[in-house]
Image (cartoon, rainbow, N blue to C red):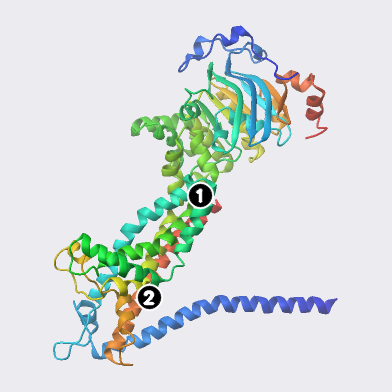
């Protein structure tokens, strides 16, 4: 079952428009992800590194205000897939995309799409915390600054708000001007999340965000994800199947560049349709 | 068995000692050179006052008493400063721009062609660069600014910039390339343009390395002798008609003075000792520049570890 459709037509008819119109749309029940509106609709996405095909005709819908987990063995293309959603792959020379990725109904690979604006709407957190060699404050203020926000008072507000949303404010509020390298790895990763939140993304892509962190930090990030999920769509790539089972509403299983199966996390982890999904989840390979 | 272990240990300690000796030798050699230069230079002050050396505005070693001779540090120091400062103004924007181009903009193929070419520039013998300067730049400067002669600080600056550029480009490029890709990705993923990422994240992160590159470039320029002898005219006093006038006229640098006069002096006389004192000053300047460059580089190294 390749490219199962998760969202019914009624769901797609109510795309989230600008700002916080979240209130206008009833929060979907987590147990019924299929009723969520699609934030991103991917159709027949293929991806090539030069002549090597890395993704094969993948179709999936990313529901809004849900956590979608992508699992699968190393090198199966899940990170490539994730990076295709904010066009980070464009930075690698010799790559090519086929298929369609609609964000709120607009093709992000279409001629009218501006990569810079796209990445503001679709933020990304990387595998290893990558704070800039600047102060904590400057890290969070970076996004708003490059988008033209110069007012100190406004920046102060954004920095505090973003750090609070990332559950980091209380730990760093007395040392906002200290180097971002002076805090722990887990704090750095939350700082990177705060940095993304400062540009108010509508979708958050997380590429194995906890793989470099200890269990306590991992727990905090997962808690944070559940909090953020109330407002934005989250897509997380993870090697850690317990993590996928713990945090996500929907899980997609990748194998050799193919999205073999997508479904509600509970079902994927209890009785998947595809034998290979079951084998992977039960640890027979990977 | 036991014996072979002992032999291994002995070999180990011999190698260690040899490495230590070669490490220490480089420091000892530099110190010995400095002590030698200082020993040859200091006796100058038995026959010529230290204060006059520092404050005299002229350099006239052959002027006969009672007016002379004059062994003034100032005109030499000024000449070195002027030529080097000019070279820095010309070289830094070009070289740092080239480094950014190499590290951030140029596609792989172009970079593989450009970087070795720029590094090759550093291997051109200085006498060849000086000759080009004398044959091409001096007449050009003369014609452009309507001067009596093209031998000028400006010509020296142009040629020294030429010599400093490869050093600055190569080391700046290394510094920029050493900035982790994750910084660039992080910036792009926030919706910053590539150029915003370069100017606001990559460039500041590489800052200490670039400063070190500039310092080493300056060090190369200020110590250069042959080129300045060939193109600056090697004569001059402190300026009294403004900066531009000084730039377009002949100057005397520390290195030029030593290079041009060292073979004509009598061993042990005051002129000989004065040249050595100039050498001491030059040594201190280059030492300070290298020290600052080293500080900057170490700061980068420490950051990269984190």
| Residue B24 visible to an observer of this rendering | yes
Mark drawn on residue A87 = none
Q: How many marks?
A: 2
Q: Secondary structure at mark 1?
A: helix
Q: Is residue A270 above or below residue B257?
A: above
Q: Can you give x and y, in whole percent of width and height, for residue A197 in the image?
A: 49, 29
Q: Secondary structure at mark 2?
A: helix
Label 2 or label 1, whichever comes before in sequence order: 1
| Quadrant containing the N terminus of chain B in the rendered view | bottom right
Chain where mark 2 sits: B
**Residue at image location 32% in from the left, 86% down from the top:** B42
Chain where mark 1 sits: B
Q: Which residue is mark 1?
A: B110
Q: Can you give x and y, in whole percent of width and height, for residue B85 in the image?
A: 30, 63
Q: Name the residue furthest right.
A: B1
**Are dots 2 and 1 on a single chain?**
yes
Looking at the picture, tell me which residue is in the foreground, A95 or A217. A95
Q: Alpha-carbon neighbours of circle 1 within 10 Å: few (<14), some, or many (≥20)?
A: few
Q: Can you give x and y, in whole percent of width and height, for residue A18 in the image?
A: 46, 17
Q: Can you give x and y, in whole percent of width and height, for residue B237 in the image?
A: 19, 74
Q: Which residue is mark 2?
A: B283
Cβ–Cβ under 8 Å for marks 2 and 1: no
In the image, taking residue A230 as reference, residue A151 lies left or right, namely: left
Looking at the picture, tell me which residue is in the foreground, A23 or A149. A149
Q: Alpha-carbon neighbours of circle 2 within 10 Å: few (<14), some, or many (≥20)?
A: some
């Amino acid at each position: 079952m390749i490219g199962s459709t998760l969202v019914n037509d009624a769901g797609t008819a109510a795309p989230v428009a600008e700002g916080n119109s979240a209130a206008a749309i009833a929060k979907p029940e987590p147990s019924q992800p299929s009723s969520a509106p699609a934030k991103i609709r991917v159709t027949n996405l293929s991806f090539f590194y030069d002549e090597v095909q890395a993704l094969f005709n993948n179709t999936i819908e990313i529901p809004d205000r849900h956590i979608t987990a992508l699992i699968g063995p190393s090198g199966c293309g899940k990170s490539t897939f994730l990076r295709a959603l904010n066009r980070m792959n464009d930075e690698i020379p010799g790559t090519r995309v086929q298929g369609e990725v609609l964000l709120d109904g607009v093709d992000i690979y279409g001629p009218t799409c501006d990569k810079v604006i796209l990445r503001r709407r679709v933020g990304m957190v990387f595998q290893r915390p990558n704070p800039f060699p600047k102060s904590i404050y400057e890290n969070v203020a970076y996004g708003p600054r490059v988008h033209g926000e110069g007012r100190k008072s406004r920046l102060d507000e954004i920095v505090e708000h973003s750090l609070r949303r990332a559950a980091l404010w209380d730990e760093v509020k007395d040392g906002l001007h200290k180097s971002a390298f002076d805090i722990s790895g887990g704090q750095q990763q939350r700082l990177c999340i705060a940095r993304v939140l400062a540009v108010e993304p509508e979708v958050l892509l997380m590429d194995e965000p906890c793989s470099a962190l200890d269990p306590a930090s991992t727990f905090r990030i997962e808690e944070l994800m559940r909090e953020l999920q109330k407002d934005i769509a989250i897509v997380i790539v993870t090697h850690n199947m317990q993590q996928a089972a713990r945090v996500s509403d929907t899980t997609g299983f990748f194998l050799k560049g193919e999205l073999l199966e997508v479904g509600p996390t509970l079902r994927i982890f209890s009785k998947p349709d595809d034998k290979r999904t079951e084998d992977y989840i039960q640890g027979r390979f990977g | 068995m036991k014996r072979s272990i002992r032999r291994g240990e002995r070999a180990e300690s011999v190698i260690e000692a040899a490495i230590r000796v070669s490490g220490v030798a480089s420091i000892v050699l530099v110190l010995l050179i400095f002590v030698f230069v200082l020993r040859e230079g200091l006796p100058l002050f038995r026959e010529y006052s230290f204060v006059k050396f520092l404050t005299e505005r002229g350099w006239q070693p052959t002027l006969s008493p009672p007016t002379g001779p004059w062994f003034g540090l100032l005109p030499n120091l000024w000449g070195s400063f002027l030529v080097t400062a000019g070279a820095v103004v010309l070289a830094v924007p070009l070289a740092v721009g080239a480094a950014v181009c190499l590290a951030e903009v140029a596609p792989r193929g172009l970079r593989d062609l450009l970087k070795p070419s720029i590094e090759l520039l550093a291997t051109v013998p200085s006498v060849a660069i000086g000759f080009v300067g004398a044959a091409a730049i001096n007449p050009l400067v003369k014609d452009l600014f309507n001067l009596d002669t093209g031998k000028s600080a400006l010509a020296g600056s142009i040629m020294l910039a030429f010599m400093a550029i490869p050093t600055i480009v190569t080391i700046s490029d290394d510094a920029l390339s050493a900035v982790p890709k994750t910084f660039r990705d992080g910036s792009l993923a926030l919706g910053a343009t590539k150029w915003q990422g370069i100017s606001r994240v990559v460039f500041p992160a590489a800052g200490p390395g670039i400063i070190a590159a500039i310092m080493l470039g300056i060090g190369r320029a200020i110590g250069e002798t042959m080129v300045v002898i060939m193109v600056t005219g090697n004569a001059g006093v402190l300026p009294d008609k403004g900066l531009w006038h000084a730039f377009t006229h002949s100057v005397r640098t520390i290195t030029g003075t030593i290079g041009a006069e060292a073979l004509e002096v009598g061993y042990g006389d005051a002129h000989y000792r004065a040249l050595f004192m100039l050498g001491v000053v030059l040594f201190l300047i280059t030492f300070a520049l290298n020290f600052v460059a080293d500080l900057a580089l170490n700061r980068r190294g420490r950051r990269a570890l984190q």
